[in-house]
């Protein structure tokens, strides 16, 4: 069985961190009506921007919540600005 080169592990690991962040944000925030997407963008080492997008369809979607946050390598949110509160 061939081994995976370390450089090939990066995108997969980063994807799982973004997925963990997405789940934790939604668990804390709740689910907005007409949720379209939760987009997690890396903006630096361990720092992310999360945009929650909702709308009747993709053409009318808008960002309803947005956060800058830091997370550990497992995707656990360490801090967030603004604080993520139960909204829905």
Image: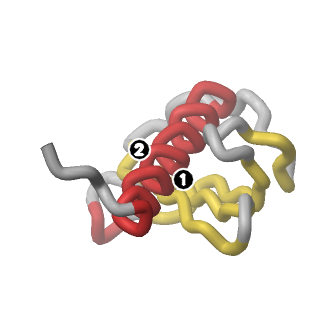
Name the residue rendered at 17%, 51% in the picture: 2
In the depicted view, which residue is nearer to us: 64 or 3?
3
Q: Position of residue 86 (x, y in %)?
A: 72, 28
Quarter of the image holding residue 51?
A: bottom right
Other residues around mark 1 within 10 Å, as few (<14) / some (14–19) / many (≥20): many
Find the residue positioned furthest to the left: 1
Q: Mark 2 falls on what kind of element? A: strand
Name the residue rendered at 72%, 57% in the picture: 67
Report how far apart the C-alphas of labels 1 and 2 lie in the structure: 8 Å
Name the residue rendered at 54%, 53% in the picture: 52
In the depicted view, which residue is nearer to us: 77 or 83?
77
Q: Position of residue 76 (x, y in %)?
A: 70, 36
Other residues around mark 2 within 10 Å, as few (<14) / some (14–19) / many (≥20): some
Q: For this view, does 1 lie left or right of residue 27?
A: left
Q: Which residue is mark 1?
A: 52
Q: Position of residue 78 (x, y in %)?
A: 83, 41
Which numbered disc flags the more N-terminal residue, 1 or 2? 2
In the depicted view, which residue is nearer to us: 71 or 56?
71
Which disc is residue 71 wearing? none
| Marks 1 and 2 close (CB-CB < 8 Å) | yes
Quadrant the N terminus occupies:
top left
| Number of on-image labels | 2
Q: How is the image coloured?
A: secondary structure
Q: Position of residue 30 (x, y in %)?
A: 59, 28
Q: Compared with residue 44, is residue 85 higher up or lower down, i.e. above or below?
A: above
Name the residue rendered at 85%, 55% in the picture: 81
Quadrant the C terminus occupies:
top right
Which disc is residue 35 wearing? 2
Q: Mark 1 falls on what kind of element? A: strand
């Amino acid at each position: 069985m061939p081994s995976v080169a370390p450089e090939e592990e990066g995108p997969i690991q980063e994807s799982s961190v973004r997925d963990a962040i997405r789940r934790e944000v939604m668990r804390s925030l709740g689910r907005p009506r007409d949720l379209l997407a939760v987009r997690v963008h890396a903006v630096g080492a361990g720092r992310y921007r999360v945009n929650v997008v909702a709308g009747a369809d993709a053409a009318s979607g808008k960002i309803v919540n947005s956060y800058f946050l830091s997370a550990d390598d497992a995707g656990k949110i360490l801090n967030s600005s603004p604080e993520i509160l139960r909204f829905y």
